[in-house]
């Protein structure tokens, strides 16, 4: 494993993908660091906005960029709506391709930030919140609490709730949890 950190692997992959004309955005804990302060991580979450017909080309680019993976397993995972799992310099890479309609919205709201002296795309804070609510793990709830507290009124809370309600329905427990987070951690 490289001692450089997963951020180095993320920047290198973004450069390779964008150099090949493929739209992408860093997600997960690395993106969270820009909206809610840093949190330790041992992997890279990378959202890649490509059609299924481009999966083979995508994997070829990532192979050339130094990733290792099992091609057939990656393709099967992507077809099933799961992350493709790769490695780069010993760091796990969770590669997400569009599996729900929200991906086009996430792509539309990507922001550019500086990471390792490079201009890179990251998921915007609202898109990151939607994905974290979809995953709905304990660590995601903790991340959301911190993100809401630190972003304050800058965060479009109604937009996030609207997307979750549209995708999952008003009665889904994620909606109630989002409302709780806003009551407890949001600005007055």
Image (spheres, grey):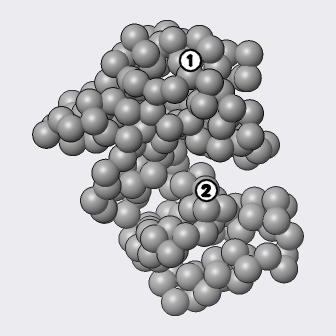
Question: Left or right: 93 with respect to 165?
Answer: left
| Spatial separation of the CA atoms under disc 1 and disc 2 | 22 Å
Q: What element carries label 1?
A: helix
Sort mark 2 into few (<14), some (14-19) or many (20+) by Cα contacts within 10 Å. Answer: many
Mark 1 sits on what residue?
Answer: 58
Query: Residue 71: percent from the left, percent from the top?
Result: 56, 22
Task: Decide which of 133, 71 is in the foreground and name it.
Answer: 71
Q: Where on the picture, by quarter, is residue 170?
A: bottom right
Question: Left or right: 36 with respect to 148?
Answer: left
Q: Where on the picture, by quarter, is residue 88?
A: top left
Residue at coordinates 56% horizontally, 36% vertically from top-left?
A: 84
Residue at coordinates 59% horizontally, 11% vertically from top-left?
A: 57
Q: Are marks 1 and 2 in contact (CB under 8 Å)?
A: no
Q: Is mark 2 on a helix, strand or loop?
A: helix
Query: Residue 147: percent from the left, percent from the top?
Result: 44, 68
Query: Residue 26: percent from the left, percent from the top?
Result: 45, 40
Mark 2 sits on what residue?
Answer: 131
Residue at coordinates 18% horizontally, 35% vertically from top-left?
A: 2
Q: In the rendered image of this protein, does residue 10 appear above or below residue 14?
A: below
Question: Left or right: 1 with respect to 127?
Answer: left
Query: Residue 103: percent from the left, percent from the top?
Result: 69, 41
Residue at coordinates 73% horizontally, 23% vertically from top-left?
A: 52
């Amino acid at each position: 494993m490289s001692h450089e950190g997963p951020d180095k692997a993320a920047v290198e992959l973004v450069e390779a993908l964008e150099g090949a004309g493929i739209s992408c955005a860093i997600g997960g804990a690395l993106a969270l660091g820009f909206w809610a302060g840093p949190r330790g991580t041992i992997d890279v979450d990378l959202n890649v906005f490509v059609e299924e017909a481009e999966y083979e080309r995508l994997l070829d680019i990532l192979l050339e960029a130094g990733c290792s993976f099992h091609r057939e397993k990656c393709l099967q995972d992507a077809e099933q709506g799961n992350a493709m799992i790769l490695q780069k310099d010993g760091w796990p890479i969770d590669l997400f391709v569009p599996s729900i309609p929200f991906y086009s919205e996430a792509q539309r709201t990507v922001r550019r930030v500086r990471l390792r002296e490079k201009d890179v795309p990251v998921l915007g804070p609202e898109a990151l919140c939607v994905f974290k609510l979809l995953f709905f793990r304990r660590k995601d709830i903790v991340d959301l609490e911190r993100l809401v507290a630190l972003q304050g009124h800058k965060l479009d809370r109604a937009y996030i709730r609207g997307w979750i309600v549209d995708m999952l329905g008003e009665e889904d427990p994620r909606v109630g949890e989002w409302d709780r987070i806003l009551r407890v951690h949001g600005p007055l």
